[in-house]
DNA sequence: GACTAACCGAGACGGTACGTCCCGTCTTAAG
DNA sequence: CTTAAGACGGGACGTACCGTCTCGGTTAGTC
């Protein structure tokens, strides 16, 4: 018996085969449920039902519900606080963090907390979360520091990665631990603490 | 139908009626599974099976698996880093954090990360976690600061709660985000940063 | 660390642990759906829903939907046509088969056809079906033949298994193939054909 | 919205527009999977994949997987046992059934059992199966009987449809029930039983 | 010494969601 | 107009655990 070999056809790129309506419906349904029911009550089945979509479609394009939430939040411009350019490091940092805090006090904060939590259980997602979210935000902050170096506001040899830890650390700590608010006052306190330390550091040289 | 309400005939306090062997077996089984399988794979049914205990017994004494893990970790002395007394704030802080970091690099770290994650989903447990763990640790750190004030190493009017955020924040950020290690070097960097800021602050007065 | 070994308790026999209400509800729901929707539309989820029972409960006690249907039908006395005793082989066979045909023209017939179909796909169920149903029915028929032998109506050395094939074969063939009805007339035709053959056989000796 | 009804532009008959290679690839893939995996594991998607064919193509030309199997088996000449002509009814029937039994002990048997099973669930397919397979086989057998009548081997007024039931019934019963083999011995037993009954019947007149 | 409340093991139960399989329909681009 | 490819909405699968429950057996004061 001869083998039937069908004629080969050119392939459509994977991304272009997606149904855009279904894609958006899934992301919208995810945010809606996240807001009304919370992350724990967010299920793949629930998203599929609300979006009017088969579960298959979700599993075809995402690996976990955390990945969906990450994409849904990322797509919302809000999560990506824009880089300010106010002319001084203190002003830039203050605006950057107070904007970030505002965002984190809404739905985005809930989502982002949940994603960090999920990352504790799922190493693959943790990797993705770090890459597409955490590191992107660190890079933005470091850009602000580098502008400060250019303006002579802090020493060129400063350990910027460490400074990023010193600023993002307290933010995440309050976000996750909820023992104190992420408000305007805390933004000022935080920036002031860092700027004074940096200036002192410069003075020491 | 009449409700029969039995008279309590025993004067034995609730805690003493517990089967101590079963209690310990549950905590040990929890730690064993946590270590070998991870928090996600840790289930009430799995603990009961491994401990040779009925599920009833677990549900009678704990409200969630997070609560069991919290108790299991708390019972291990390790989690409660002892307060050092080295004679100087810098030495105390350095010892305190480098000990804490060591502990967090083992099973305890895994457990504690999972509990912080769980707290994001479960407000009741978050409350318990803050009370019995987070706040206890903050109090310890603040005690060190207060000794520093007594020694004249930092100003009496310092905002110690804020300083605690500035030290625990970066620790938790690295623990949860895993972008950089919690090692001896980081302990020194962190303490040095804070001490210098504090000294500068004092000098300003 | 010492191993906690709980005290051993005597076990309750598996069957006695079953919830009788749930058990009956499942069998009743199965028959109800089988009657109204047919075997194809009969699903484990549908049975569970109709019976007000968890799927787990069904999977705990049965291996397949065919097994449930088999038990449900077996429990109905109807399926087990009683052994007649009319005094002659011809009368016994005629009553036996015409009763059987009547039963097979109702819900039981639908069920039994489906089970035979299912047996074609599932060797384990086929085994169970043969044992608890087919062979039981063959045994009953053979008992009638043996009474005939005792009465001297057929030769002692007759191949009763083969005779069973010759009588049940045409019945199943019509049941499954539906090319002609299983009615009173066919029962008489079938019995007559066999009896005459048998008598001829005896006459030959 | 207006309905667009295209004008048929081609005069080529539907059947001739088929891609013959794809058609054959589908039938071959079906038999291959049926043989290696069994009917339950045979799926439209599996056939399409193995044949290197789109699912569309299958759905365009067949209504169900049973229909494909039926065509695949029918195309194999094997299934259509040729009509013998040995000069006597006994010889013809014996050859006819022993050939049939041989065929049924191979892949064809598996396929045919599955189709009969499928027919229990799908009335439309049952109709097709009876027409193209069962009735064709009955007709063949009846032709043999008619030749017997012509030769004076059985009475002209014999109920041939009933005789067909009496011979095919036991065959199907053993095929589906698998309680005893379809072997040479059974073919002889069966033919002998019928022939002797027929002769007796003739003698009675 | 018997009684009995409370604890204990075992595990059945109703239930939710999981991730997978396959269905039959559909859309797209190539031939 | 057919075809290969495969995305889509959908339904059911069988599994894993959840938290509740009932069942007997065990243990430790109370009467």
Image (spheres, coloured by chain):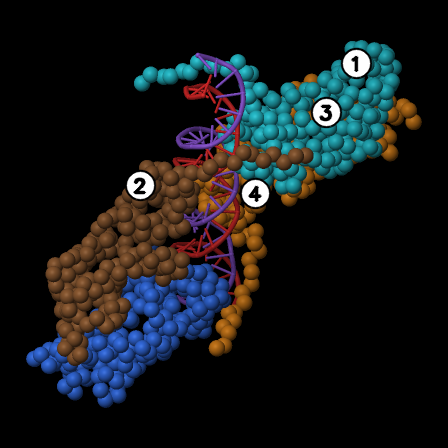
Chain colours: A orange, B cyan, C brown, D blue, E red, F purple
Q: What is the chain identity of the residue bearing mark 2?
A: C
Q: Secondary structure at mark 4?
A: loop
The residue that label 3 is drawn on is B80
Determine the residue positioned at 64% across, 37% down: B32
Tell me the crowding category of disc 1: few under 14, some 14 to 19, or many 20 or more residues within 10 angstroms, Cα based: some
Estimate the x, y position of residue A143 in percent, counting from the top left. Answer: 76, 35
Q: Secondary structure at mark 3?
A: loop
**Given this view, does label 2 or label 4 mark the residue nearer the observer?**
2
Determine the CA span between mark 3 and mark 1: 19 Å
Determine the residue positioned at 81% across, 14% down: B147
Determine the CA span between mark 2 and mark 1: 71 Å
Estimate the x, y position of residue D89 in percent, counting from the top left. Answer: 22, 84
Determine the residue positioned at 77% across, 36% down: B181
Q: Report whether mark 1 lies on the same chain as mark 4.
A: no
The residue that label 4 is drawn on is A64
Q: What is the chain identity of the residue bearing mark 3?
A: B
The residue that label 2 is drawn on is C24
Determine the CA span between mark 2 and mark 4: 40 Å
Estimate the x, y position of residue D132 in percent, counting from the top left. Answer: 28, 71
Which numbered disc covers residue B146? 1
**Given this view, does label 1 or label 4 mark the residue nearer the observer?**
1
Determine the CA span between mark 2 and mark 3: 56 Å
Q: What is the chain identity of the residue bearing mark 4?
A: A
* Quadrant of the rendered image containing residue C159: bottom left
Tag 3 near tag 1, CB within 8 Å:
no
**Given this view, does label 2 or label 3 mark the residue nearer the observer?**
2
Q: Is residue D8 visible?
A: no
Tag 1 near tag 4, CB within 8 Å:
no
Q: Nearer the viewer, residue B21 or B46?
A: B21
């Amino acid at each position: 018996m001869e083998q039937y070999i069908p004629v080969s056809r050119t392939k459509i790129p994977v991304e272009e085969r997606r149904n855009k309506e279904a894609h958006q419906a899934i992301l919208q349904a995810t945010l809606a449920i996240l807001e009304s029911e919370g992350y724990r009550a967010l299920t793949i089945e629930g998203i599929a039902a609300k979006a009017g979509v088969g579960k298959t479609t979700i599993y075809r394009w995402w690996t976990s519900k955390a990945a969906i939430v990450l994409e849904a939040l990322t797509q919302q411009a809000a999560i990506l606080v824009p880089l300010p350019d106010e002319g001084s490091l203190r002003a830039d940092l203050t605006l950057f963090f107070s904007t970030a805090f505002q965002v984190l006090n809404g739905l985005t904060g809930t989502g982002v907390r949940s994603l960090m939590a999920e990352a504790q259980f799922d190493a693959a997602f943790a990797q993705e979360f770090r890459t597409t979210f955490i590191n992107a935000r660190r890079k933005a902050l470091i850009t602000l520091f580098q502008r400060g170096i250019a303006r002579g506001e802090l020493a060129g040899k400063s350990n910027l990665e460490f400074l990023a830890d010193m600023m993002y650390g307290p933010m995440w700590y309050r976000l996750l631990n909820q023992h104190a608010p992420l408000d305007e006052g805390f933004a000022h306190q935080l920036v002031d603490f860092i700027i004074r330390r940096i200036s002192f550091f410069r003075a020491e040289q």
